[in-house]
Amino acid sequence: MEYNGIIYNYVLRGYEVKTQIVDINNASLLDSFVESHENGHFLQTSLWARVKDDWKWFGVICRNDSGEITGTLGVLLRKISKLPYHMMYAPRGPVCNFDDKETFAALIAAAKEEGKKYNAYELKIDKDVPVDNEEYRAIALSQGFKFKERTINFEDFQCRYVIRIHLNGRTEDEVFAAFHSDHRRKIRIALKNNVEIKIHGSEMADVFYSIMKETCERDGFELRSAAYFAKILDCFGDKARLYMAYYEGRPIAGAISVLWGDKVWYFYGASSNSDRKVMPNYLLQWEMIKWAIENNCRIYDFRGVAGVIDESNPLFGLYRFKHRFDGDYVEFMGEMDLITKPAAAKIVAASQEILKKLR
């Protein structure tokens, strides 16, 4: 391997691959590749790095010997408090063909090399690859990754279990007809009650936040700041939308979705405690699904659901809500970790255990 500034060269299986390190201000090629690739994800872009501006970030671009880009990797870095180490995290990365062992290996090797500048002790990835893809599992294991023990709900950084609609070129009428009859009825209730959906940007982040606060207090999950929601909308521009549902002129529910490549993700949703009988959440979802159809997307991703599909699970209602939009239940492989500095990893783990005891 040769190292010359930001270029790393490798010879794998008889042909050369070249990886280039890019920063947040020089990542247009990386972002374009992520947008064009079927395995791309908006969390792998430099735009997401701008949202997560309390982390450091670098990107890796891999080219084959013909100069064609074959894969990319966006890496966030978090400084460990009171210790001289960083954790590297590539959410939903790397972006390459699932069976491309050479590109995967080159991207990981370059990230490890670049991570030395930050005294990084670990690289964590959680690619959205189905759990039964044994070829991908073998590739990850061959590079030294260890798989995290299987979780059952929302314990991972990213959702391990999701609901996805595979749109497959269907029309609005065809997609709507596939919804559960009760969901179609509730969408019609919202329309009959003149619930209006409007599309906004960051100027309505404070209003969305106030409704999200109600939601978090009701359902018991972490509340993000209004500035965080505004940042998503500003950083992604026309690729992110804030959909707000109005009833009798008042905002009663909202959702943020992101379009990147051939997918739309439902990212955040909130609903007021009042006027739930007019079914705003069902109409919101339908409007976001229509956005995916208008853009010829392959997938509308509802993101997380519980890993235990049982009516006794308090989260079963979330699964039923998303699944009845004709969504497929998908389990991903989950988190996998590559320890690059074993001694440092032990120090970090020990310090975190001490902090737990002191809390």
Image: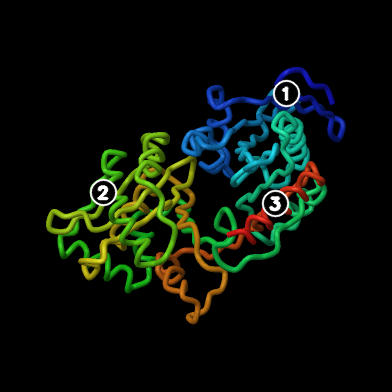
**Looking at the picture, does residue 5 appear above or below residue 100?**
above
In the rendered image, residue 34, in percent from the top left (x then y), is placed at 56, 36
Q: As shown in the figure, which amino acid type bears the numbered disc 3?
A: Ser
Q: Which residue is mark 1?
A: 66
Q: As shown in the figure, which amino acid type bears the numbered disc 1?
A: Ser
Q: As shown in the figure, which amino acid type bears the numbered disc 2?
A: Val
Residue positioned most to the right? 14
In the rendered image, residue 174, in percent from the top left (x then y), is placed at 37, 60
How many angstroms separate mark 1 from mark 3 (CA)?
Answer: 47 Å
| Residue 351, numbered circle | 3
Quadrant showing the C terminus:
bottom right
Q: Is residue 106 left or right of residue 328?
A: right
Q: Quadrant of residue 14?
A: top right
Q: Secondary structure at mark 2?
A: helix
From the viewer's side, name the closer residue of 312 and 86: 86
Q: Which residue is mark 2?
A: 207
Identify the residue at horizontal 56%, vertical 37% (top origin): 55
Coloration mode: rainbow
